[in-house]
Amino acid sequence: MFQRLRARMGKTSDKQPEALDRDNIPEHIAIIMDGNGRWAKSRGLPRVAGHHSGMKAVKRITMAADRLGVKYLTLYAFSTENWKRPKAEVEFLMKLPQEFLAIELQELIDNNVQVRMMGYKQDLPEHTLSAVEEAVRQTEDNTGLVLNFALNYGSRKEMIEAVRLIGEDIRSGRLAPADIQESHLEKSLLSSGLPDPDLLIRTSGELRLSNFMLWQLAYSEMWFTDVYWPEFSEEHFYEAIREYQRRARRYGGL
């Protein structure tokens, strides 16, 4: 069923990325970046220190994905439920996109990476939204890896909003209920234009989806690890892909 790797930093496989089948690299990888706070707590640090260290993992894995030829990398950065966290922590999290992009944007541009955002803009602070939108603007013509940040994203809200859009089409006469197809819902989702993820990775040992891409992950391979996100290394990333390559994807067939 689900593959779960029980490992900590320094206990990963000694295989190198050359062992990967370069003809079977997942086109779209989605990651639930979990465990920043627990990583910090285990070191006697404040939770925000874990979030800050998690930024280094974002760069590390983005560059690894780019080198492997992954076409889309979606990172679950902040959920619609994360607003329930303590105010100080939320404020710190809202500063991270601005800090990350101020440091890394030029390198992303130099590597032909295109930045996108998937989420609800209306609730985001101006400084957060402006930083992300500027990165999107500066990289919109890039043709390499698509780095898609799921920011203020929740899958149930996404699907409800998609159903509302379909309802508007029905009310206006543009669509008959009997004609509704999967494609009508898919084009109304925030992920419209992206292929469904081939591989989902979740760090920190939790075995749940946490309201992330519930429609899009219907046939995705899933790989879970106990490793906290700040210590998630390139080798952990390669191991997830190696496991993906060992599986047979049948999509309900034989």
Image (cartoon, rainbow, N blue to C red):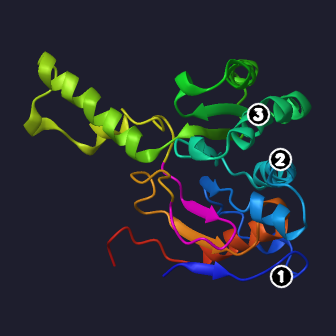
Of residue 176 and residue 122, the one placed in the foreground of this image is: 122
Q: Amino acid at mark 3?
A: Pro
In the picture, the disc for residue 13 is 1
Residue shown at 82% from the left, 59% from the top: 230
Task: Say above or below: 220 vs 123.
Answer: below
> Image check: 247 left or right of 86?
left
Main SS of the magenta part reads loop
- Rendered view: 55 above or below 228: above
CA gap between label 2 and label 1 equals 24 Å
Residue marked by disc 3: 97
**Mark 1 touches mark 3? (CB < 8 Å):** no
Q: Quadrant of the C terminus?
A: bottom left
- Residue 111 placement (x, y as % from top left): 84, 36
Secondary structure at badge 3 equals helix
Above or below 233: residue 144: above
For the record, the magenta segment spans 196-209
**Residue 171 makes an appearance in the image:** yes
Which residue is disc 2 drawn over? 55
Tag 2: residue type? Met
Q: Amino acid at mark 1?
A: Ser
Location of residue 115 (image quadrant): top right
> Residue 141: x, y in percent?
70, 22
Neighbours of disc 1 within 10 Å: few (<14), some (14-19), many (20+): few
Residue 207 placement, left or right of 217: right
Q: Is residue 193 left or right of residue 101?
A: left
Q: Pick whichever of labels 1 and 3 is earlier in the sequence.
A: 1
Query: Which numbered disc, 2 or 1, marks the residue that appears first in the sequence?
Result: 1
State how far apart marks 1 and 3 are (Cα): 32 Å
Q: Residue at the location (49% across, 76% down)?
A: 248
